[in-house]
């Protein structure tokens, strides 16, 4: 029978305890450590032990550290190592805690067995070998929590008619070399650290937000003065699936929602089905496509007013499907979200797992 050793069974190993620990060779050293069932903020751990003195073991000491990054800023404060004290329970046991485990992060772990003495001191074994592992991305459970938070602030829906993508002139010149096509590229690491699409999903970023007073795309952009515009129904229609990808901010009042548009049955669609919450294209708080009940019966499109939508389209696109023109506004570099890091202190867009 497996018993989970949840948060409440752990204590952080404080410095005051270090002076009360003595080594005792009789206690078995954990061997052949195995890490399994890894999530963004938990893992299971088990090991083999020599049977001798096994009955004397009352506690396990777990030394958990973030793996050193050779490219890290040498002037930045190092993360404080996390040393946990757990009661000896049947293995494997679950180590869970969002305050010391972050998603997509490499860790090292080592274990000691310990026996609590009558005077309160601990006799301990030698440390085990050091094992490395990496925590996982957000699961759909975590993404649904983010989705619910984003829905709260999405605001009313505004009508729009085009998706647009701003880049510099050189980008569009290069597209002509690629058969006059925009090709998907791997999403950068902007947004939530645990996002399952960062560094994995391939797509083309589009915007659709409009100015509330004109109903048209803004004339300013952080990404370049040349804009590709394409009719909304070319990317978003009943043959397209819509997925929620992320919700974040960058230490500002602006909040961003990442959505994914994937043609049904495409490779991008299969990727998203396994990892992201699907949205009803005609009934959600961010981006909708509905049959027009009046007029010609065509499709009508709406976007949320109070969040900035970043829409990823997963397939290549021919420039001939739209138009490229220079905008009259400014290139506002300060609003760029390229590799932008999420504000971990924002209560609006964070959930109670690693940021």
Image (tube, helix red, strand yellow):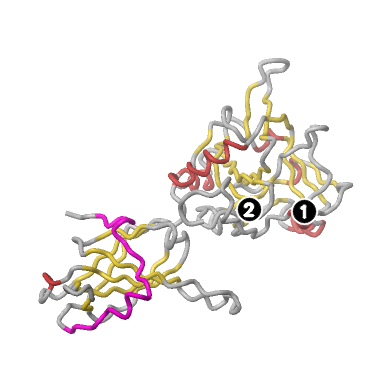
Q: Which quadrant of the structure image shows residue 90? A: bottom left
Q: Quadrant of the N terminus?
A: bottom left
Residue 276 at x, y = what percent?
Answer: 49, 44
Number of numbered markers: 2
Q: Earlier in the sequence, mark 2 or mark 1?
A: 2
Say left or right for 142 vs 185: left
Residue 162 at x, y = what percent?
Answer: 74, 36
Q: CA distance from mark 2 to mark 1?
A: 20 Å
Name the residue nearer the viewer: 238 or 188. Answer: 188
Q: Regarding mark 2 in the picture, which secondary structure is present there?
A: loop
Residue drawn 76% across the image and 43% down it: 320
Residue drawn 71% across the image and 51% down it: 181
Name the residue nearer the viewer: 28 or 260. Answer: 28
Say left or right for 21 vs 96: left
Residue drawn 63% across the image and 36% down it: 154
Say left or right for 182 vs 79: right
The residues colored magenta run 4-25
The residue wearing badge 1 is 222
Crowd class of label 1 (few under 14; some 14 to 19; many from 20; radius 10 Å): some
Crowd class of label 2 (few under 14; some 14 to 19; many from 20; radius 10 Å): some
- Residue 189 lies in magenta, yes or no? no
354 w.r.t. 84: above or below: above
Residue contact between numbered discs 2 and 1, judged by CB atoms under 8 Å: no
Say left or right for 259 vs 214: left
Q: Regarding mark 1 in the picture, which secondary structure is present there?
A: loop
The residue wearing badge 2 is 184
């Amino acid at each position: 029978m497996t018993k989970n050793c949840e948060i409440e069974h752990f204590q952080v190993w404080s410095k005051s305890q270090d002076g009360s620990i003595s080594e005792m060779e009789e206690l078995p050293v954990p061997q052949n450590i195995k890490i399994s069932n890894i999530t963004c903020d938990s893992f299971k751990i088990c090991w083999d032990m020599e049977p001798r003195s096994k009955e004397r073991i009352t506690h396990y000491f777990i030394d958990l550290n973030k793996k050193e990054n050779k490219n890290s800023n040498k002037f930045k404060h190092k993360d404080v190592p996390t040393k946990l004290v757990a009661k000896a329970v049947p293995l494997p046991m679950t180590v869970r805690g969002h305050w010391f485990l972050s998603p997509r992060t490499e860790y090292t772990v080592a274990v000691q067995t310990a026996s609590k003495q009558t005077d309160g001191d601990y006799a301990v074994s030698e440390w085990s070998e050091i094992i490395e592992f990496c925590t996982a991305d957000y699961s759909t459970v975590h993404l649904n929590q983010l989705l619910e938070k984003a829905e709260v602030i999405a605001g009313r829906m505004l009508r729009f008619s085009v998706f647009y993508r701003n880049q510099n002139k050189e980008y569009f010149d290069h597209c002509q070399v690629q058969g006059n096509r925009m090709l998907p590229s791997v999403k950068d690491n902007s947004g939530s650290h645990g996002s399952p699409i960062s560094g994995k999903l391939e797509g083309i970023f589009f915007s659709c937000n409009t100015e509330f007073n004109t109903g048209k795309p803004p004339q300013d952009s952080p990404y370049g003065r040349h804009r590709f515009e394409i009719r909304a129904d070319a990317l978003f229609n009943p043959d397209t699936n819509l997925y929620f990808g992320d919700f974040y901010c960058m230490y500002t009042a602006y909040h961003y929602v990442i959505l994914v548009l994937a043609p049904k049955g495409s490779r991008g669609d299969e990727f998203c089905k396994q990892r992201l919450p699907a949205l009803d294209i005609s009934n959600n708080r961010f981006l909708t496509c509905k049959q027009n009940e009046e007029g010609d019966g065509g499709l009508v499109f709406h976007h949320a007013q109070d969040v900035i939508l970043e829409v990823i389209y997963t397939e290549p696109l021919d420039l001939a499907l739209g138009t490229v023109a220079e905008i009259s506004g400014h290139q506002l570099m300060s609003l760029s979200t390229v590799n932008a890091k999420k504000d971990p202190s924002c209560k609006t867009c964070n959930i109670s797992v690693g940021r």
